[in-house]
Image (cartoon, rainbow, N blue to C red):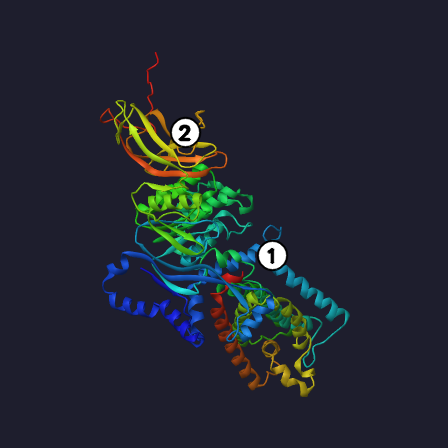
Amino acid sequence: MAIVFRTSERTPWWRDIDPVRPVVLLWQRRHLIGQLVRREVIGRYRGSLLGTFWMVLLPITAVLVYTIVFGLILKQRWPGIESNEWTYPLVIWAGLALFNAFTEVVQRATSVIAAQPNLVKKVVFPLDVLPVMLVGTSLVPLVLSMLAVTVGIVFCRGEIPNVFLMALTLGFFLIWLQGMAWFLAGVGTFLRDLGPMVQAICPLVLFLTPIFYPISVVPVQYRLWFWANPLCVMVETIRAALLHTAMPPLWAMAGCVCVCLCTWQLGSLVFIRLRSEMADVV
Amino acid sequence: MNQLKQQHGLSRRPSQQLAARLAVSSPQYDVVDSIALRLWGLGKSYRRYQRQWDRVKQWLWGRDRQYYTEHWAVRGVDLTIPRGKTIGILGANGSGKSTLLQLIAGTLTPNEGSLQINGRVAALLELGSGFHPEFSGWENVRLQAGILGLSEQEIDQKLPMIAQFSELGEALDRPLRTYSTGMILRLGFSIAISVEPDILLVDEALAVGDMHFQQKCMARISQLGEMGVTIVLVTHDIGTTKRLCDEAHVLEKGRLVQSGETEAVCNWYVARMLSGENVPECQPHQPYRHGNQQAVIESCQLLDVKNQPTTQAWIGSTYTLSVKLRFAKDIERPVLGFYLRDRFGTELFGTNTDNAGIELSGVAGSEATVQFRFDMHVRPGAYSLCVGLVDDPTQPVCLDWMDDAILVEVHDPIPGRTVHGLFAEEIEVTLAE
């Protein structure tokens, strides 16, 4: 028999520091998360004629547009590597896929709790699953894009990218993104200004992250600031794995790993502490 | 101030003592096992901020100052609910019933006090609220059952049962947006009930849906009650409470003001609703009386055909309810009426002097005796007669009201007969040629 005890007393916040506990909980709730992600992914295109096929179709049309604009019309070439008109759009696509997943998650995270008042007030629901659902949903196009880019690079350059390094980077990217999602979902429920704030910052992130250009074109005195951005390190690492170019400096990668793990812990901590109050404001 | 806070905190903080007590008493399982729910000084407050910026200020400088006004939705509720009982929680709108239920369900966290729940809780707070309109009934069942905490295997196992109980048949293959409100409710109830809870929380949500399904829901709830599920029912409906509940509690402005045996508490609650503040203490098994006493019911008796007072009645015989009144003040339009109620509190029949076209003259100091004559055609069992004297039947002001004025036991003169239904009408049955 399950005995539940609830009290108004709050445990001190440092008791909730435990990076492993979210992992255990996520594993226990994997079926529920699966159901929710399925609902999001399928539900988005439900009722349309092509259905989930849109998920594949949209990135393909996007990359076709990049190829035509950048490769065929502007005749852009990626600096530092031998390339043809197909390589440049593929390389951009790899960076953009990460950025798209990032923007989708952070923008939706700020309102994900407020958008589901029924789950907050009417049923006993593990709310920490909702931000996980967002990350899980964004994972689908991300992985599809990465597969397409890898296949494309193999065809264009005739050499196989470092798939292991790509997967590892994606893993840390997800840890970082999940921490961000928890943090923004927790704070955004109470501070509704966070939504527009994030929306304002996102385009800035797009151009301050080396997505349309390699970091080698950035003047040396500004590079430190770029390496402080974990998204920049991860985009550069993915590209290095794809094209076998120079890796980011080791200290930047180590710092990025630290930032990822800290974000994970901070995000889950903030969410856990704010969760009990959410029903009061939604 | 600080000292006061500490004292206050101590009195509302039984958790540590409780934890110690639990640890000591845990080998004796009957101690915990006989109790389903326990609330200690439970309270929930909401902070009302005038402006959004006040919330930010409170975060930043909250230790020293207060930028909000506090509103207590529920406060100081102490309650012990034994396992297997069905309890009703009564209260006007905004009295904190739903908040209390949400606190028990776990969707809200208390600001004060603590609660202990022994067993799995299912809450019927709002049915069908988490459905996705574009998905089929089946897909929604899976999703919703997952949200309610069922595992994949449990869902597979329960799917046929849910489908059968909802009676939706082939409609389950269609997207939910094609469903009617009633169909969505049916599906919601079927899923919620499939969780097989130890403790079931029911809000007034069930007041919708067609008659057939409503009855099915009620039957299922009482069936669960008989199976030993503890049920907490929140409702306005006195009839439902009397029919289903073992004990009842009344909430008023977030505080528990009355607890006890259902019949007595329900009568007290009705009196409170009708007459306001000045209602005497609620006592079980006593005729329940209220009113402003400007005119009083001196006595009432049930007389048999020989004009002898009785409490035993026989089906088919004629009885007279004789009520003696005395007017202390001038009453403009006094009306006297009565009801016969069964043991569930259902009003079976009754009438009043206004209906019968009799005008009582309510002159101060005068007396009157009114007699109601009727044949007893109800099935055997225990009944009560409720007598009430009011002024102006269009806008009744209660002068004197007695619930359970007379308790009657009805017997069947024909031994071994079964009476079908509530009434024992004389029905002629013949075989047509």
The amino acid on which the numbered mark 1 sits, given as a three-letter code, is: Phe
Secondary structure of the residue carrying tag 1 is helix
Q: Residue furthest right?
A: A73
Percent x, y of residue A261? 50, 77
Residue named by callout 1: A53
Instruction: In the rendered structure, find residue A201 and report the number of the disc placed on it.
Output: none
Q: Residues within 10 Å of mark 1 (few under 14, many from 20)?
A: few
- Of residues B5 and A75, the one nearer the viewer is B5
Q: Is residue A19 left or right of residue B68?
A: left
The amino acid on which the numbered mark 2 sits, given as a three-letter code, is: Thr
Labelled pair 2, 1 in contact (Cβ < 8 Å): no
Q: Is residue B86 left or right of residue B276?
A: left
Percent x, y of residue B317? 29, 23
Question: Number of marks in the image?
Answer: 2
| Residue B421 in sight in this render | no
Q: Residues within 10 Å of mark 2 (few under 14, many from 20)?
A: few
Image quarter where the N terminus of chain B lies is: bottom left
Percent x, y of residue B359? 45, 27
Q: Is residue B364 left or right of residue A38?
A: left
Percent x, y of residue A264? 50, 74
Above-or-below relation of A5 to B131:
below
Identify the subunit bearing mark 1. Answer: A
Q: Is residue B220 left or right of residue B27?
A: right
Instruction: In the rendered structure, find residue B351 and report the number of the disc placed on it.
Output: 2
Image quarter where the C terminus of chain B lies is: top left
Identify the subunit bearing mark 2. Answer: B
